[in-house]
Image: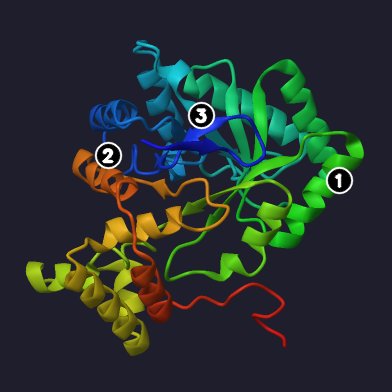
Amino acid sequence: MEYTQLGRTGLKVSRLVLGTMNFGPQTDEADSHAIMDAALDAGINFFDTANVYGWGENKGRTESIIGSWFAKGGGRRDKVVLATKVYGNMAAEGETWPNHDKLSALNIRRAVDASLKRLGTDHIDLYQFHHIDRSTPFEEIWQAVDTLVAQGKILYAGSSNFPGYKIAQANETAARRGSYGLVSEQCLYNLFERRAEMEVVPAAREYGLGVIPWSPLHGGLLGGVIRKEVEGGRRSGGRTAEALTDTAVRAQVQAYEDLLDKHGLEPGEVALAWLLTRPGVTGPIVGPRTAEQLGSALRAVELDLAPELLGELDEIFPGPGPSPEAFAW
């Protein structure tokens, strides 16, 4: 496993991030524990979760599964750089009581204590804002964060799904306060969806944030979906199937798979390896449902994509380019 610094921090993290969103809804507790053990054995030290994972009446379940894994001991907690998120509504199912969501100082305080309890730990290494909060000023957010840092409950703060201007606004406000500011941005970014290159990635690099792409296979679209249809004899479902009804998208994906067949490469592994070549990227989030899927993701770290292949990938998925050139002369 390769390691890198998380943005401008001194924190060393693996170049693959273990995403845990499937733990609970898709993968039971025993298999989730096995996947986390396998990830740790492979050198992955960066684990990502969120307080809402588990969803619906089971929100918080994923953090609890991680907490029960930590409780097994063996240095598990000490070896992991633990990231979780705050924003989503954590009120009991069916309740509409206020102040159980978003980024008010009250909810941040409430949410971090609840996450710590579920995770069975005394601190969170990276506490991420899951979405922008248009109603709460950054002065209030940083006041709450600075208090938590002083209490030792969190070490760093990060963002997720922030536009570039909000990254700038957040860190300019932090600088005026003498706060450390955001150290990472977790965004939708992959070969098919490259709009983050316009504003988000440049803003993150300018302010020293590590970029953590989520959905690196774009919901399976970049994982050899057409070949699996042919070999398995059945069509994909959900958003992937919907995307493939667009003939232009299907042609792109087919060209992608044909190119990698020519080179003898697996599409999903190349999609991850491509992200590892992108400037500013710390590491993509992989969310395996099984140990076999984790093994495929690990092979991506070993891939060395030739410049010629990178150029061919750019021809299929050109991306918008940086702004303002992406939308102006």
Identify residue for label 3: 82
Residue 173: image tag: 1
Left or right relative to 87: residue 176: right
- In the image, 119 versus 184, the foreground residue is 184
The image quadrant of residue 105 is top right
Q: Is residue 260 above or below residue 303?
A: below
Residue sitting at x 54%, y 35%: 84
> Mark 1 or mark 2, which is nearer to you?
1
Q: Under tag 2, what secondary structure?
A: loop
Q: CA distance from mark 1 to mark 3?
A: 25 Å
Left or right of 78: which side holds 297? left
The amino acid type of the residue labelled 2 equals Thr
Q: CA distance from mark 1 to mark 2?
A: 40 Å
Identified at 23% across, 32% down, the residue is: 31
Q: Is residue 137 visible?
A: no
Which three-letter amino acid code belongs to the residue tagged 1?
Thr
Q: Would you say residue 33 is visible in this rendering?
A: yes
Badge 3 marks a residue whose secondary structure is strand
The quadrant where residue 225 appears: bottom left
Colour basis: rainbow
Question: Which disc, if any, is residue 27?
Answer: 2
Residue 253 on image: x %, y %? 30, 77
Is 311 in front, or is 6? Answer: 311
Numbered disc 1: secondary structure: helix
> Mark 1 or mark 3: which comes first in sequence?
3
The image quarter containing residue 152 is top right
**Residue 82, how many percent across, how many down?**
51, 29
- Given the image, on which type of amino acid does mark 3 rest? Leu
Count of all numbered marks drawn on residues in the image = 3
